[in-house]
Amino acid sequence: MLALLSTRLRTWLLLAIALPAVRTLIHRLARRATAADPYSRTSRTLARADTTLTRWRSRRRGQTAASPRGSA
């Protein structure tokens, strides 16, 4: 079914739906892992992935990681 969709539509679906869902999932997993054991390798890896995705998202929106939306 996915093969029948145009390349542009598949790209849009990936960027608009799949990546935000993955980011949310990683963020929730990172918070749970950090709450359970903040020094474990898993929690550090998930926290690093969450930070990377948050930075990427901020850059895509034209923001810097140091200045969140709403601040001058």
Image: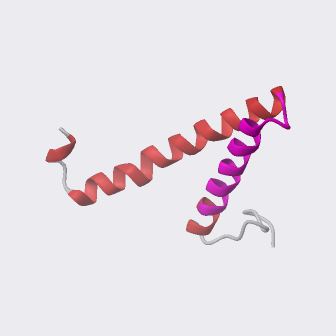
Magenta stretch, main secondary structure, is helix
Q: Nearer the viewer, residue 49 or 11?
A: 49
In the picture, the quarter occupied by the C terminus is: bottom right
Q: Looking at the rendering, which quadrant does residue 45 occupy? A: top right
* Left or right, residue 21 beside residue 40: left
* Left or right, residue 63 beside residue 66: left
* Left or right, residue 70 beside residue 25: right
Give the residues in magenta: 37-56
Q: Position of residue 35 (x, y in %)?
A: 83, 30
Q: Nearer the viewer, residue 24 or 50?
A: 50
* Left or right, residue 62 beside residue 44: left
In the image, residue 5 sits, relative to residue 59, either above or below, namely above
Q: Residue at x 52, y 46 (%)?
A: 20
Q: Looking at the rendering, which quadrant does residue 53 occupy? A: bottom right
Q: Looking at the rendering, which quadrant does residue 28 occupy? A: top right
In the picture, the quarter occupied by the N terminus is: top left
